[in-house]
């Protein structure tokens, strides 16, 4: 099976992690120490952006699960930042299976978001499009250490989540209503981007299915297995 460059990157992240993985990672019982002041700080917990910034501050697991269901219904009107924050908060409160699903959901939507940005209008530092693009990349990398680390402790379970997220890619709608001040390519490009993302996920799923033992071995060797 020939893998695309994007898929290879996803695979490396999923079971090997990032080479800069921090030595002070908090492991199984800790919170994800993500901060991007003034937008998000894990201690004291602060969230200043996103549609659900107040609701995501809860430390009540039941309330957070209710919020997750609410966001599920409203997902095409929900900013990607909130999806990432939801995954982090679920992880923090011990709902790690749900956290991994929401992380992959946010990651898929962020990937398509980046590809739908009008390259002539992204701008540079200070531009909303540029700043958001960089923020989503950063949160994906830092939170990904924990979420990807957990997600493939059980490879079959991880594959199931990937399959679920793949099935839902087709339901992604325009980003223009969520980010009215950002310039995007015409929505006629959206179907192609969704198809490309589905292909990447399919290739990843196939790879995971046929390389289970190799993946497990590498995770054990690198100290990732059961760390998170």
Image (spheres, grey):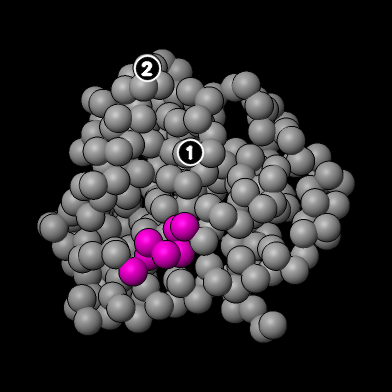
> Residue 119, position in %: x, y?
30, 73
Stretch of the chain drawn in magenta: 164-170
In the picture, measured across the screen, residue 174 lies left or right of residue 1, that is: left
In the picture, measured across the screen, residue 98 lies left or right of residue 173, that is: right
Number of marks in the rendered image = 2
> How would you rate the neighbour count of disc 2 (Cα within 10 Å): few for under 14, some for 14-19, many for 20 or more?
few
Q: Where does the C terminus fall, quadrant-wise?
A: top right
Q: Is residue 145 visible?
A: no
Q: Quadrant of residue 65?
A: top left
Q: Is residue 200 magenta?
A: no
Mark 1 vs 2, N-terminal side: 2
Q: Which residue is mark 2?
A: 60
Residue at 40% x, 78% y is 195
> Which is the main secondary structure of the residues drawn in magenta?
helix
* Vertical side of 81 occupied by 58: above or below: above
Q: Quadrant of residue 146?
A: top right
Q: Circles 1 and 2: CB distance less than 8 Å?
A: no
Q: Where does the N terminus fall, quadrant-wise?
A: bottom right
Tell me the tag on residue 62: none
Foreground of the two, 9 or 170: 170
Foreground of the two, 98 or 113: 98
* Vertical side of 61 occupied by 2: above or below: below
Q: Which residue is mark 1?
A: 99
């Amino acid at each position: 099976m020939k893998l695309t460059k994007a898929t290879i990157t996803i695979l490396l992240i999923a079971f090997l992690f990032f080479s800069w993985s921090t030595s002070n990672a908090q492991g199984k019982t800790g919170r994800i120490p993500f901060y991007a002041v003034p937008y998000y700080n894990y201690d004291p917990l602060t969230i200043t952006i996103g549609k659900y910034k107040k609701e995501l501050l809860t430390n009540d697991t039941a309330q957070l699960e209710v919020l997750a269901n609410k966001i599920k219904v409203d997902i095409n009107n929900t900013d990607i930042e909130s999806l990432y924050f939801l995954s982090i908060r679920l992880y923090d409160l011990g709902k790690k299976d749900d956290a991994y699903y929401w992380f992959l959901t946010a990651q898929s939507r962020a990937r398509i978001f980046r590809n739908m940005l009008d390259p002539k209008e992204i701008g540079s530092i200070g531009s909303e499009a540029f700043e958001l693009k960089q923020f989503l990349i950063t949160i994906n990398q830092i939170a990904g250490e924990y979420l990807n680390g957990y997600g493939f402790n059980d490879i079959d379970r991880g594959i199931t989540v990937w399959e679920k997220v793949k099935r839902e890619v087709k339901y992604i709608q325009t980003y223009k209503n969520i980010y009215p001040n950002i310039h995007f390519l015409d929505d006629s490009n959206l179907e192609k981007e969704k198809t490309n993302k589905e292909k990447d996920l399919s290739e990843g799923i196939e790879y995971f299915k046929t390389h289970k033992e190799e993946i497990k071995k590498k995770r054990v060797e690198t100290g990732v297995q059961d760390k998170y």
